[in-house]
Amino acid sequence: MGKLRLAIILVSLLLTTLVLLPLQLFAMRFRPALAARVPMWWQRVAARCLGLKVRIEGEPVTDRPLLIVSNHTSWVDIVTLGSLLPVSFIAKSEVGGWPVVKWLARLQRSVFIDRTRRTATAASNSAIAARLAGGEALVLFAEGTTGDGITVLPFRSALVGAAREASGADQPITIQPVAIVYVGFQGLPIDRSRMAEIAWHGHMDLAPHLVSLIEIGAVDAVVAFGTPIRFGPDADRKQVTAAAEAEVRAMVRSIRARGLKNITVTAASPDAPILSETESG
């Protein structure tokens, strides 16, 4: 049954890609607003295939331009967050060279940045600033790498500075801290020993990790939206980054302390603009 389910999921994702690919290529050229939403539809199909169920806490802001600053546990974060909002991701340049993934990342309209060379920071900032100045919503995994799903690594402020380049006196950028926490497998709490089943590190092969996650069958996640931060041209990027990091840490601690207690998770509806928060009890 496991191999049959895997085959059905892969075929479903392939068919979804074939259907949405021409639409997205057209939208990227002629309909930018539509191009921001098509990847969200793909991510919602992927979320259903993975059995990913998400609860939202807090309110995602509607202000644009928007820079979402989040923690990072796994490639699954892209599906988790991408199925909720029409966003693009800031990705490391290596992703642009990965088979298959590179094409999906480009269709997601990802911004590729080189984090290995300090001299590339200015160019990366300019690319991010240009997209923000166009009124888009971007996601920055501010730790710069994936963590273990339990602790939050220090946030890097260099790329947050790109928001300052895009901001002006009459158009400040909104920065919103976001915490992504995986709390259950098949309705049972995830303890530390099983967190490695969803946490994904750069040296791990993607395909086996994907297969093992599909075999689990159901993943429960919480996405918490924090207090928006107005970031104008005179703002201190290090202070703003520190504030965002502190709030993400607090939200992660709170969610992990509660685990699955009093949490009901709801899968994304294909036509809903965003998931609705649900309460149990």
Image (spheres, helix red, strand yellow):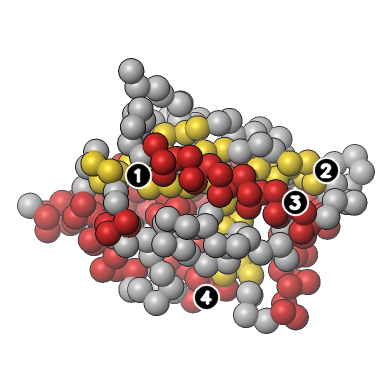
Q: Which residue is mark 4?
A: 94
Q: Position of residue 113 (x, y in %)?
A: 64, 70
Q: Position of residue 172 (x, y in %)?
A: 83, 43
Residue sitting at x 65%, y 43%: 176
The mark nearer the N terminus, 4 or 1, is 4
Report the Cα–Cα distance between label 2 and label 4: 31 Å
Q: What kind of residue is marked 1?
A: Val
Q: Position of residue 204 (x, y in %)?
A: 35, 73
Report the Cα–Cα distance between label 3 and label 4: 27 Å
Report the Cα–Cα distance between label 3 and label 2: 13 Å
The mark nearer the N terminus, 1 or 3, is 1
Q: Which residue is mark 1?
A: 183
Residue sitting at x 89%, y 47%: 168
Q: Secondary structure at mark 4?
A: helix
Q: What kind of residue is marked 4?
A: Glu
Q: Position of residue 76 (x, y in %)?
A: 40, 55
Mark 4 and mark 1 in contact? Answer it, CB < 8 Å: no
Residue lying furthest left: 1
The mark nearer the N terminus, 3 or 2, is 2
Q: Which residue is mark 2?
A: 172
Q: Is residue 9 left or right of residue 171?
A: left
From the viewer's perspective, is residue 56 above or below residue 50?
above
Query: Foreground mark, 2 or 4?
Result: 2
Q: Secondary structure at mark 1?
A: strand
